[in-house]
């Protein structure tokens, strides 16, 4: 029987270190990054990260399934599930407790141009930017 060795990073305190978070690919940053609850204080807000926003956009607005969302964002399907659950919890907190929502942060890269898999996508941000530019030129 052959032995396999696994390298485990150990923190200074002696515990195992988590694997570094993989950078997530998002289509674009949202146009609106703040939603205010009437009467809420600015200190009492919930922050949705850009990857949480993108997962919600792809699953709930574009209606992709979790596997398709994972491929589009270059992450695993279980990671999509974790991000989605976190986003839903934050939005529920904001709605139930009357807190404002901000959208910022997260370890993300924004795609620079339309990717081959986005050619037939109705909600591709690059297609929308091209359409807006065409309208402005008219």
Image: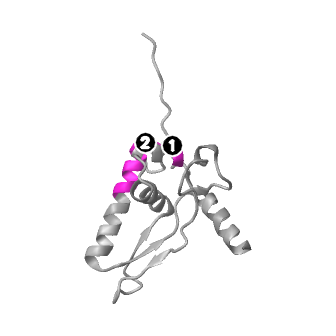
Name the chief secondary structure element in magenta.
helix
Residue 15 visible to the viewer: no
Q: Name the residue under label 2.
A: 67
**Front-most of residues 75 and 71:** 71
The local secondary structure at tag 2 comes to helix
Query: Over which residues does the magenta segment extend?
Result: 71-85
Q: Position of residue 133 (x, y in %)?
A: 69, 69
Left or right position of 137 against 71:
right
Residue 73 visible to the viewer: yes
Q: Name the residue under label 1.
A: 71
Q: Residue furthest right?
A: 137
Q: Is residue 128 above or below residue 3?
A: below
Q: Which residue is drawn at 40% across and 46% down?
A: 65
Q: Which residue is drawn at 42% across and 85% down?
A: 42
The local secondary structure at tag 1 comes to helix
Q: Residue at x 34, y 56 (%)?
A: 85
Circles 2, 1 touching at the beta carbon (< 8 Å):
yes
Q: Count neighbours of disc 2 (C-alpha within 10 A) and say few if under 14, some if 14 to 19, many if 20 or more.
A: some
Q: Quadrant of the N terminus?
A: top left
**Front-most of residues 125 and 67:** 125
Q: Does the magenta stretch include residue 87?
A: no
Q: Where is residue 28 in the image (x, y as percent from the top left)?
A: 58, 61
Q: Which residue lies furthest to the bottom in this view?
A: 39
């Amino acid at each position: 029987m052959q032995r396999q060795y696994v390298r485990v990073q150990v923190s200074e305190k002696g515990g195992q270190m988590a694997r570094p978070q993989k950078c997530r690919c998002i289509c674009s940053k949202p146009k609106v990054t703040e939603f205010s609850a009437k009467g809420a204080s600015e200190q009492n807000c919930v922050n949705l990260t850009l990857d949480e926003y993108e997962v919600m956009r792809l699953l709930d607005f574009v209606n992709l399934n979790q596997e398709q969302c994972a491929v589009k964002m270059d992450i695993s399907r279980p990671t999509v599930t974790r991000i989605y659950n976190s986003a839903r919890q934050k939005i529920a907190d904001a709605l139930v407790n009357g807190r404002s929502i901000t959208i910022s942060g997260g370890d993300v890269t924004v795609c620079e141009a339309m990717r081959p898999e986005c050619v037939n996508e109705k909600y591709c941000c690059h297609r929308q930017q091209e359409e807006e530019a065409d309208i402005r030129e008219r």
